[in-house]
Amino acid sequence: MSTSEITPGYTIPSFVVDPVDGEHIRQIALILDDPNPIHFDLHAVAAAGMGDREINQGGSTMAYIIDMITSWAGTRSALQRIKCRFRDNVRAGDVVTAGGTVLEVTGGGDNRRALCEVWVDRGDGTRVIDGTVVVAIPEE
């Protein structure tokens, strides 16, 4: 892809997780020392009225957007800002897709930036995260 193709309306290649792994959710809870049992205790999930599968951490779901941007831009350092709203939960076994569209391109040369609308959708069509990112676009 040529960076000159990055204009408003450009669709960022999506990033798919198929499926979200319950063991990964439990491991992240351990790594983060997250005491919320909805990430590792199915009885707690059921008692909270949240179904029968582990609930993914919001930050892990947001990381799918970061993974998408990194794959597209070629480096994590290109991501300069991320602002997201968490709208629903992702559970173990869900298929999720991170997507995005360029809204605006500003600057020039080494200071060229893209403001992008981003989201994560669950396989049932529910948008679980939406927001914006600012990405540095490298010079050609």
Image (spheres, grey):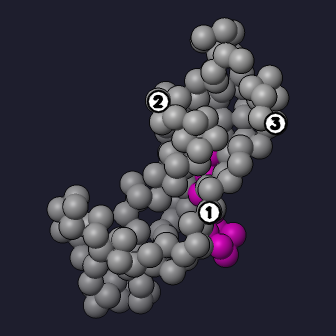
Under mark 3, the amino acid is: Gly
SS state under label 2: helix
Under mark 1, the amino acid is: Val
> What's the CA distance linking mark 2 and mark 3?
23 Å
Circle 1 packing at 10 Å, graded few (<14), some (14-19), many (20+), is: many
Q: Quadrant of residue 5?
A: top right
> What's the CA distance linking mark 1 and mark 3?
21 Å
Label annotation for residue 77: 2
Q: Quadrant of residue 41?
A: bottom left
Note whether residue 34 is visible: no
Write the residue at 30% across / 64% down.
Answer: 28
Under mark 2, the amino acid is: Ser
Looking at the picture, tell me which residue is in the foreground, 4 or 101: 4
SS state under label 1: strand
Write the residue at 50% across / 45% down.
Answer: 66
Quadrant, the N terminus: top right
Q: Which residue is mark 1?
A: 16
> Is residue 56 on the magenta stretch?
no
| Mark nearer the N terminus (1 vs 2) | 1
Circle 2 packing at 10 Å, graded few (<14), some (14-19), many (20+), is: few
In the image, taking residue 22 as reference, residue 3 lies left or right, namely right
Q: Position of residue 54 (x, y in %)?
A: 38, 79
Look at the image and give the residue range highlighted in magenta: 118-126
Q: Which residue is mark 3?
A: 9
Q: Position of residue 45 (x, y in %)?
A: 33, 83
